[in-house]
Amino acid sequence: MYIISSAADIKQKAEQIRRSGKTIGLVPTMGALHEGHLHLLRTAAQENDIAVCSIFVNPTQFNNADDFDLYPRVIEVDAALLTENKCEVLFAPAVSEMYPEALQLKFDFGPLETVMEGRFRPGHFTGVAAVVSKLFHLVKPHKAYFGQKDLQQYAIIRRLVTDLSFDLELVCHPIVREPDGLAMSSRNRRLSGPERQVATHLYKALQLARDLMANKPVPEIRTAVTDYLKQYESIKLEYFEIADAHTLQPLTSVAPKTTVALCLAAFVGEVRLIDNLVVS
Ligand code: AMP
């Protein structure tokens, strides 16, 4: 596996791969890789000649300095996992490579970013859109792989690709979960033993909401989920939304045949986790 840290070098490498007629599948990550990331990577390796993974803890998408500082960084372990999983190129730049100058550009994705993550993490999606645009320009992938775990991020990137005419195909991979249902996340490794146990209730709350959808109105489902999570002292629910899965706008009632996204964010102890369940 090639390990590349400079923007100029990854650009050159990507151009060389393209000139040789091979296709590139890109998996952008922030590292501390887990089986969720590796699923994306293996899919990228299957569907393209060359799988490229980027690892970059992107400062512009963090609105909380502690969250950025405490984000796990284990590049040697990650590199070994990538080699075992058919990654041919790892792009792991320093902040100065990605941002030779401070970012000035601001994105505005309209209603898509005034809800959920956008509402609770102001500026987050500008950081995401900026770094993803830069990665697309540097790596020039034919296909780029993202997880449904970050459902709103995927919707934002879809908009970015459409609005800026990026010439690539986006792939959204289903959420990979632990056997007990907890969505895999790099942040899970910051949970203490008891917090890790309690964290399984986030997915259980989403399943409860899904089950109630058959015969309860939206306000009752919201209350049921809030009450369910209140039982656990270490969980602080930030939001639970019942949203249209395409527009991500909150629903006050669910019309027949609507695909619904049940989305939540919660602190478990000091660790902020998100999860979602899409129900057709
Ligand atoms: P991150 O390193 O958390 O920024 O994630 C990198 C990519 O992996 C994003 O597109 C995430 O949505 C995706 N991802 C993270 N966790 C999971 C998971 N449990 N299942 C599927 N995809 C995931």
Image (cartoon, rainbow, N blue to C red):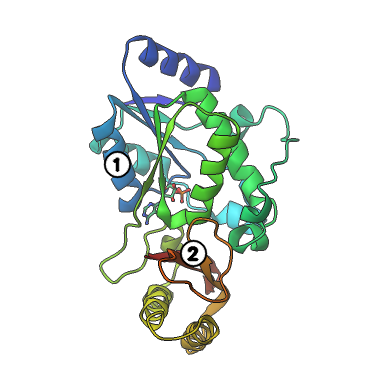
Tell me, yes or no, if residue 57 can be seen here. Answer: no
Badge 2 local density, few (<14 within 10 Å), some, or many (20+)? Answer: many
Q: Quadrant of residue 277?
A: bottom left
SS at mark 2 in the image = strand
Q: Residue at x 35, y 37 (%)?
A: 79
Depth order, front residue of 142/255 = 255
- Identified by mark 2, the residue type is Ile
Q: How many marks?
A: 2
Residue 60 percent coordinates (x, y): 65, 44
Task: State the residue position of label 1.
Answer: 81
Depth order, front residue of 167/225 = 167
Task: State the residue position of label 2.
Answer: 274
Position of residue 100 relative to residue 232, above or below, is above
Depth order, front residue of 215/269 = 215
Mark in the foreground, 1 or 2: 2
Position of residue 194 relative to residue 93, above or below, is below
SS at mark 1 in the image = helix
- Identified by mark 1, the residue type is Leu
Q: Is residue 229 left or right of residue 174?
A: right
Residue 190 percent coordinates (x, y): 46, 63
Residue that extends furthest to the front in the rendered view of this protein: 256
Badge 1 local density, few (<14 within 10 Å), some, or many (20+)? Answer: some
Position of residue 214 relative to residue 244, above or below, is below
Q: Residue at x 49, y 18 (%)?
A: 11
